[in-house]
Every structure is written in C-alpha cells, then in structure tokens.
Amino acid sequence: MLNLIVSWSLLLIPRYSAAADLRIVQFRNPNTEYPHDAIFSVIHQWFGVHEHQFYLTRRSRSRDLPKRTSIYWTWLPWDSDPDAITRGNELFTSFAPEHPDHAIISTTRVGFPSLAMETQSLVDDFSLLSNGSLRTESHYGFISRVDGVAGTTKPGIWPHAPYILFPYKPIWIGFAINTVFYTTLVSMLIWTVRQIKHARRMRRGRCPHCDYELHHDFRDGCPECGWRRVQAKAEQ
C-alpha cells in the first residue's frame, strides 16, 4: 500500500514542475513490418516520474526545448521496452486513434527508488469534444480532462504526466525492489522509535517494556512483564 501511495503521490510533481530532461529522437526503419516506419520518441523526466512519448509527425509548432537543470532519480535494473519502432507501432495499434497524425501516445512510469507502476495514455489534439476538451484515452490508469484551448496553444510536444491519475499496471521488478525498500525503511523506523521510547522510560526509572515503576533498580528485572527476570536469575 505504501508503494502505491508513494507512486501515485509522485504524479503531483509534474503538475507544478517542468520536466528536468527532454530528449527528442526520430527512429526510422524502412524495412519494418509495421505500418509506421518512422516514429518520434520523446522522453520527459521528473523526480520519480518517467514519460516516454510516441507520435508520427513533427508538427509545425513542435520545437526542441533546452535541457533544464534539476534533480531526478528513478531507475529500473533494465528497460523492458523494445525499440521505439516496435513499441510505437504496438501502442498505435492498441489505441487505434481516429487521427493518428495528431495523436500523441505516452507510457508514464512512476515510483521511487525504482519505477513501479505504469499507465498508457492518448491525447488527440485534432478531436475537440463538445465539452471543450480533447479526446483522451488511457490504459491501466486514468487521465483527467485536457482542455482543448490548452492543447492547441502548447508546443507540439507536451507531457501527459500532469494529467495522469492512479496508474495501476505493476512493473514487477520495480515493485518488488520498492516493497523491499519500504519494508526495510519502516522496520528501521519502528526499531528506532522503540529504542527511543525504551531509553526514555529507563531514564525515568521505569521498565522499558511495560513502563512499570522500578525506581531505577534494573538489576532484578521487571516483576510485572518479566523483562530481564530470566537473565537476572541466571546471574544469581
């Protein structure tokens, strides 16, 4: 549960912060067996959030953005995604957008210290719905309303992460790493709090386990809960 809470909470960062890194690469493979032989691949990164976008055309308003100085740390032992041509075609086949040339499809992964949850999302900024929002779709998660005006005034490359809610497809290796990490962290926290509590009770002359009044006489242990009683008898 803590793993999910942390992962979902990390998605608040893209709502208030620009991506720390942005890389745009076009992949072309004329020998591919897929219908789309050229895929643009874009990477956005924040602390604990990694978004990989795919689209077919670099629209006229698209532009390169400078790399921003920031701190982000999130990782996987290895990247399970295939190459951009394969992955992009799989996503376009899965979503089957009405206007492929105007659709941006993203895979957004979240988690700390390792990426643990994933969702896929589509925004078609050529399909304006009657309520003024753009057509959106998501797999393994939810995407909030994307205002049509916001979509048409942004550059052609803009992240979906600020609109993503509750991704629920687990990345099992990352989920396992985070579970071990948080279990260890919580166990250490509980142990530290317990040691502090025991030390405070002993400073007051009380039993560190049950808080029974011992008047600072710890030699014979605690007659109430039995703390150190067996050890005290053995020493006698």
Image (cartoon, grey):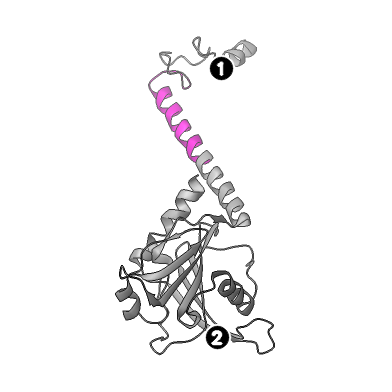
Q: Amino acid at mark 2?
A: Gln
Left or right: residue 68 versus residue 95 is left
Highlighted range, magenta = 188-209
Q: Position of residue 142 (x, y in %)?
A: 45, 59
At horizontal 40% and vertical 13% (from top left) the residue drawn is 215
Left or right: residue 121 versus residue 150 is right
Classify 136 as above or below 223. Answer: below
In the rendering, which numbered label is found on residue 220?
A: none
Q: Nearer the viewer, residue 234 or 118?
A: 118
Identify the residue position indicated by label 2 in the image: 26
Q: Is residue 4 magenta?
A: no
Mark closer to the chain start, 1 or 2: 2
**How much space separates mark 1 and mark 2, taking CA atoms?**
70 Å
Q: Quadrant of residue 205?
A: top left
Count neighbours of disc 1 (C-alpha within 10 A) and say few if under 14, some if 14 to 19, many if 20 or more.
some
Q: Position of residue 179 (x, y in %)?
A: 57, 48
Identify the residue position indicated by label 1 in the image: 228
